[in-house]
Image (cartoon, grey):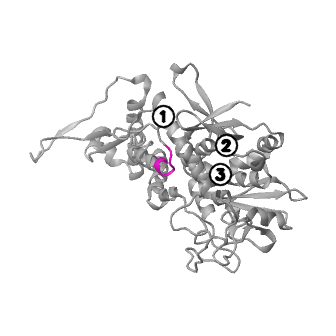
Amino acid sequence: MSQIEYLVDSNSLLVAHSAAHGVMFTSGRPAANPTMPRTENTTYGSTDEVEFWGEGNDFPQQIIDQYSKNTLIPRLLGDRTSELIGGGLVAMRRVGVDERGNDVFEWVDDPEITAFLDDFQVNRALYELANDLLWFFNAWVELIPNEDRTKIVGFVHQEAAFCRWSKQKKGKCEKVLISADWPNNSPDTTITLPAIDPYAWGSIDQVRADTKTNYIYPINIPTAGKVFYQLPFHVAIILSGWLDIVQSVPSLKKYFMKNGMSLKYHFEIDNEYWPQYFGEAAWDEASPEEQLSLKKKWLDGMLKALTDIEKAGSSIITEKIYDMQGIKGYRNLVTITPLNDLTKDGKYLADVLEGNAQIAYALGADPTVFGFAGGEKMGARSGGSDKREAYLIEKFRLQPIRKFLLEPLAWIARYNGWEQRYPGLKILTRDSILTTTDTGYGAKQTAQ
């Protein structure tokens, strides 16, 4: 069996895993299930059947609608989803530590496990779960046992935007309601499935002894003070007003392009100019409509003289008269003022850059990785070394979230007997670590 070195401190893996299932490694069975506080003061309300997700029970739909109008947020969330799942799943077994104290893993070459982890449906479901976890900090996966209930053979993603918790009982929600029509669902469009309790000591035995065929395993990224639905950190983009600022700039630019670009020059014409130019008799005899026509004809000629490429470098003549009152001296009868192109002056550019930086920070993304242009005071370094180091830091910061994502697979490994067959088994993700050119190769394979 080939060996692969796990590059993260071994304690981080063991502690995180024990947080979810550590009690299962102790001797004996716990005397009771953990205490689950009950709350009547739900943030957004509920009905007799469902706990609301958002004030109108449409929080995911609102997030999707607002984020999808932004050019940066979906891209960053998509990139971080790819970083989270890496290059696919792999089964490894911890066989010891190296001289630096890092875990050393051995590849588990088991046809049953490999077939499950390599299945395209499992990998598609994993990507969709990771996507939901980063968008909403909540995700749901459907697990289906085989007919004799000895193995979990189905691993199906359920869209987070379609899932709601059932009304709580004794401090926990026991079912998940699934509908594509929230918040306007009906009984005909709603499916109810039992939920596996990740905190219950005997959840595996309960499922094995049950008669139901479909179960939901919930995943989330814990946030402070939230009960049923976790609140993504990046919602602060909306609450702080930065998203509104960034979103308003394209509309302003569009308005300027539509209305500002047609105005190239401002002509200020003294009333005394027209009789002198056209002749006093001709001007006085002209009707108001004829005078307006003469002005338009004159303006067409001036614009042609100012904008005709073939006449570039030519000159125009305007007249001055002496103010007989002696107050202003000579004054211009014609004043031509070029107007600034509002689409080229960089107006609001600094606001957009700062807003995009705030969006990236809220999403936990390092702007260096995606080539953020930055600004005079925002740091514009995006060279190869900077990108590599920022990328590595992002990967390591995703470790806790990756463990939440892989938790259902750890549960399956225990249910299916894989852990008993291979003590120390871990379901990890393949990955590539970018290296410097002086190492002789461009990337190093690892598992996380």
Residue beneath the point at 76% across and 61% down: 204
Instruction: Report the residue marked by disc 1.
Output: 389
Residue beneath the point at 68% across and 76% down: 167
Residue at the right extreme of this rendering = 147
Q: Secondary structure at mark 1?
A: helix
Instruction: Report the residue marked by disc 2.
Output: 428
Decide: few, some or many residues near mark 1? Use Cα within 10 Å; few <14, some 14-19, many ≥20: some
Q: Amino acid at mark 3?
A: Leu
Q: CA distance from mark 1 to mark 3?
A: 24 Å
Label of residue 405 in the image: 3
* Pointer 1 or 3: first along the chain: 1
Looking at the picture, how far across and down is residue 188, in whole percent? 81, 71
Q: CA distance from mark 2 to mark 1?
A: 22 Å
Front residue (pair 226, 33): 33
Q: Secondary structure at mark 2?
A: strand
- Provide the residue span drawn in magenta: 360-365
Residue beneath the point at 76% across and 50% down: 420
Q: Amino acid at mark 1?
A: Glu
Closer to the eye: label 2 or 1:
2
Residue 248 lies within the magenta run: no
Front residue (pair 35, 384): 35
Looking at the picture, how far across and down is residue 41, in whole percent? 55, 79
Q: Secondary structure at mark 3?
A: helix
Residue at the front extreme of this rendering = 27
Q: Amino acid at mark 2?
A: Leu
Q: CA distance from mark 2 to mark 3?
A: 10 Å
